[in-house]
Image: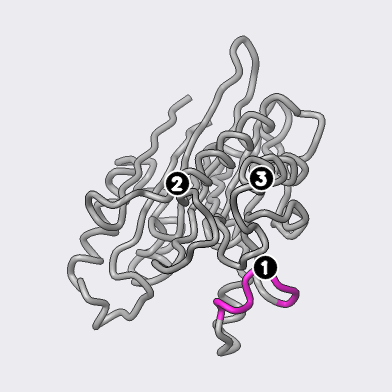
Amino acid sequence: MRIETATAPGTPGAPNEDFVAVALPAGGHGGALVLLDGVTPPPDNGNCVHSVPWFTARLGGALLELSLSRPDITLADCLSASIAGTADAHRDTCDLSHPLTPQATVVAVRWGAEEVEHLVLSDSVLLLEDADGSVTAVLDDRIDRLRAEGRRVGPLRNLPGGFFTAAADPAVASKAVTGSTPVAAVRGLAALTDGAARCVEVFHADDWASTFALLRKAGPEALLTRVRDRESADPHGAAVPRGKPFDDATAIFIDL
């Protein structure tokens, strides 16, 4: 098995709000990965005394542990329990009802002897490569659909008819895109935060198949370099308008 990951902050020296982890059970088959992209709050948001990296590490670590230790429950149930536990860790000091309480996008994958289970919540991406090399993107496309309708995305976070992130409400786990694939039909997989997916989703220079091919050939560092080269060629977002000229970027590639 080959496992490679790379991550980089959008601004050198600034906190990286992404989280990535993979674990393989000792003496057993299978494994799990978790990828989170923390949502950056505005500078004047004082509802929580904890940082976004604190939140993503806490939530991501809990989700990875449950994904491995509780194979009897679904990934959505693992996420729900992880959100609840993380909320309990700071509800006495922080206003968890605030719409900008720390939160994150989620990709979780668990594989065993028979199947590969997946969960995607919000705009990070999961790529699955089948036995013949075809690549399928698993996406939670709610944000894209809202933008296509010309609607403002921010006010619709974690609201009916909007889009959902993992924050303090365990119920949002039921909104995730979930599924499973026979393990024999999955040759490899990759997970990307939206910052690592920019060559496809923002710059429209690549597609998912070519992105996966780059990951397989040269690894996640090469993908992040390609993204940074595109961002650096348009450092102020003049040619390609975007919310952040540079973004935290994280990718993980696994050859099963």
Q: Residue 65 or 212: which is nearer the viewer? A: 65
Residue 36 colored in magenta in the image: no
Residue 160 colored in magenta in the image: yes
Disc 3: which residue: 118
Above-or-below relation of 149 to 6: below
Above-or-below relation of 30 to 41: above
Above-or-below relation of 34 to 151: above
The answer to whether 199 appears left or right of 111 in the picture is: left
Disc 1: which residue: 158
The furthest residue to the right: 72
Tag on residue 136? none
Tell me where residue 108 appears, x and y as whole percent: 61, 43
Disc 2: which residue: 53
Q: Secondary structure at mark 3?
A: strand
The furthest residue to the front: 93
Tell me where residue 226 appears, x and y as whole percent: 26, 56
The residue sitting at 34% across, 71% down in the picture is 203
Query: What amino acid type is highlighted by mark number 2?
Result: Pro
Magenta stretch, residue numbers:
153-161
Tell me where residue 30 appears, x and y as whole percent: 63, 24
The answer to whether 109 appears left or right of 252 in the picture is: right
Tell me where residue 76 appears, x and y as whole percent: 74, 46
What secondary structure predominates along the stretch shown in magenta? loop
The residue sitting at 47% across, 40% down in the picture is 20
